[in-house]
Amino acid sequence: MMNSISIVVAAYNRLPLLQRTIESTIASIRPGVYLVIVDDGSGEETSDYLQALKDRLGDRLILHRQLNRGPAAARAVGVELAPTELVCILDSDDCLEPGALDAILLEFRRKPNLDAVYSNVIVRDDFGTEVSQVHYPYYDDPSKMLEAVLLRPQVPFKHSGFTFRRAVGLELGNYDVRLKRKIDIDFLLKFLRAGKHVGHIEQPLISFRVHGKNISRSRLLGITCWWQIVYRHAPNPRVLVWALLFRTSVELGKMMAEQMGLLSNQRTLVGPTPDLRAPSSARFRRSVSLGLRRVIGLIGLDSILLLTAWMVAGLWESTRNSQDGFNLSSMLIVLSVSIGLMLIKGLYKDGRSRRNYLSIAETLTLAQLILLFQVWQSSGGIVLDTVFWLAWVLGIAFVCAGRLGVDMLISRLHWRGTARSPIFLIGTVEDTRQAMQLLEQDGCYTVVGQADVMAIDRRNWNETFEHICRLGVTEVFVCSWGVLQDRMFFYWNLWTAGIGLRILPIGSVGPEVPFQKSEVRLVAGLPSLRFRPPLVTGMDFWAKRIFDFVGSSLLLTVLAPVYGLIALSIKLDSAGPVFYGQTRIGLQGRPFKAWKFRTMVVDADRLQSQLEGRNETKDGILFKIKDDPRITRVGRYLRRYSLDELPQLFNVLRGQMSLVGPRPLPVRDVEKFCTHHLVRHEVLPGITGLWQVSGRSNILNFEDVIRLDVSYIQNWSFGLDFKVLLKTIKVVFRKEGAY
């Protein structure tokens, strides 16, 4: 009887996700079922958890540790270590559905000649809610499978749950450790090309969890892997060239869209976007419908009242002089000038602006003067003199009376509990209670929900945020800003969702108030800072990503001769490569290779440990020394004018960096970070930033660096990026803070 099976999991950090995966497998462990975990170079926290799990499960868990070699190598080791005939591959962020192993074993018992089997999957969000089901085709021919995977936008085969006979997998060469991507498709194609019997179970046996870490990696690497797979497995590669070219063009198009910010580079259905400021989609601000109705209604009312004023003045003149005093065709000019000036003056905004009767009178007077000037220049004239002055007085009186009537009507509706704006309150219990009393007196808002600020942090913020979105609130009022944790994360989440934020100073206001695009408004007699998202959210961020992509492309083209001269100078000056790639920590703490022109001797990294005692920074996080002996002659010149940073334009083009943002730091520096320093990893790192234009190497206290980075993130806008770029040019030419 076929009752034994090994579950192979390749683990690499992401402990919270790994824990859920392990718990789903433990529920299925029984005699004959083994769990094989290959720790592919995880950090201390994950390693400690796995060791504790080994102590708990004993012989039922086979734990192997190795240096990071990638998922293919980890799975290959897991297959070799598996003690059973059947091996089930499970991703470290997916889960077995209840009864999954029983269904797999039953399929092998029913079909003794079966060599491998895969099933459909269920897509679940972070909260375990089913989002959708993915139904994979049944593949029995390698050419048809290659054609399908090349032409479909979503990968139609996922390795989680793929179960096969261990002896057959080893006979076919196991997982190919040379492949970085598409290893699941490559492995299944090996079975199909060898004529092995592969089955398909319609029942979804695996939960594929969508989360913020489902980030698509380099599409250029993916394209390379597609070409490798077609070359390896297509019986006649030329037959599939058209499909391969189609997939290549699709991937290149997606890559360009991702770099420009027009397409999220996440394979997620729900969950946060990779960059803190990036919108999940373009949407109108939550309150835009109410605001548009208000503006359109007021413009319509003012137009009717102004038209009435001119008609009354014209009729009065015609009764006195028995001549037409009103020309209907001229009213288009009158209304255009009057309404246009009122719009420019801001008299259609919400709040007190629409009740500023003095400003209304001044604006309509200016409109009449403009019309009078036009009459003076026109030979035929638009209106008679008496009509002009009477229409001016009546227009001011009618419009002010109309605004007063609207205010009285709205106030009456507010006190009846209708026409109020739905809001959500966040604060301490006492601050929230006081805010409720004051807002009730104001009568303009309906509190549809509230949350205790002491119970909100990054771990449970998603639940609170989803609740706020479901309630359909237009604004969130925070009355204990100083107590709120992760303020910047909180602020940008609301901003990109199109939800307004107001800060009521009932509790203490902390130092991290984002003053960008804010205005002070009175609510119930108290000043509040209001942050209104733009009409269409994400425009600034999209402009930034488009500017990054286009700007880096143009600069790489224009500066190509400069690259050649610098490369030649480096080669003539010292032995070693032209470029130096260093692992830096970027967005969401992910490592990447940051490229620079080599400015130091080849063994500079080894010599750094000998120079740590000369480090001039106060806290030792950054490594800075003047007259660094490792710097070459050409390197000293390149550093003086920051020319060594030019290759990072390739990082910008690939979407790993931005032109402006917090500078990415080496692993050595990040390992010394305190918790509050990690906030700089919430946005794309940049070639230049506030740190670089505020002193560069002259800033020796890392807390000052963090202060500048936090200030940049809080007050970010596309305009701020442009100012930093302009200031960077000045700083570079003046050689300020460079050594």
Image (cartoon, rainbow, N blue to C red):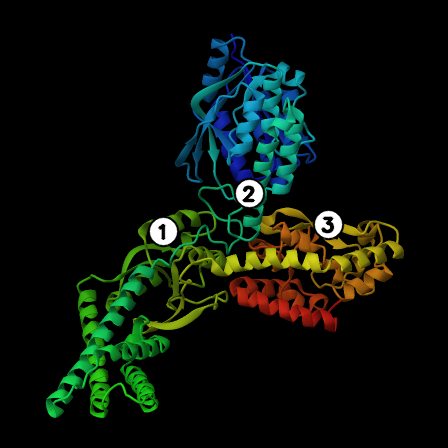
The residue tagged with tag 3: helix, strand or loop? Answer: strand
- The residue tagged 1 is 469
- Report x, y in % for residue 283: 40, 54
Q: Using the image, determine if residue 292 lies above or below residue 24.
A: below
Q: Secondary structure at mark 1?
A: helix
The span from disc 2 to disc 3 (Cα, nearest Å) is 22 Å
Residue 629 falls left or right of residue 446: right
Marks counted in the figure total 3
| Label of residue 30 in the image | none
Residue bearing the label numbered 3: 582
Look at the picture and state if 109 lies above or below 365: above
Of 190 and 492, the residue lying toward us: 190
Q: Residue at x 50, y 32 (%)?
A: 94
Element at badge 2? loop
Q: Which mark is residue 215?
A: 2
Image quarter of residue 309: bottom left
What residue appears at the point 45 percent right and 41 percent down from the top-left corner? Answer: 269
> Of the residues tagged 2 and 1, which is closer to the observer?
2
Above or below — where is 632 with respect to 226?
below
Kind of residue sitting beneath label 2: Ile
Closer-to-camera residue (612/571): 571
Quarter of the image for residue 239 reads: top right
- Looking at the picture, how far across and down is residue 459, in whole percent? 47, 47
How many C-alpha atoms fall within 10 Å of the one at disc 1: few (<14), some, or many (≥20)? some
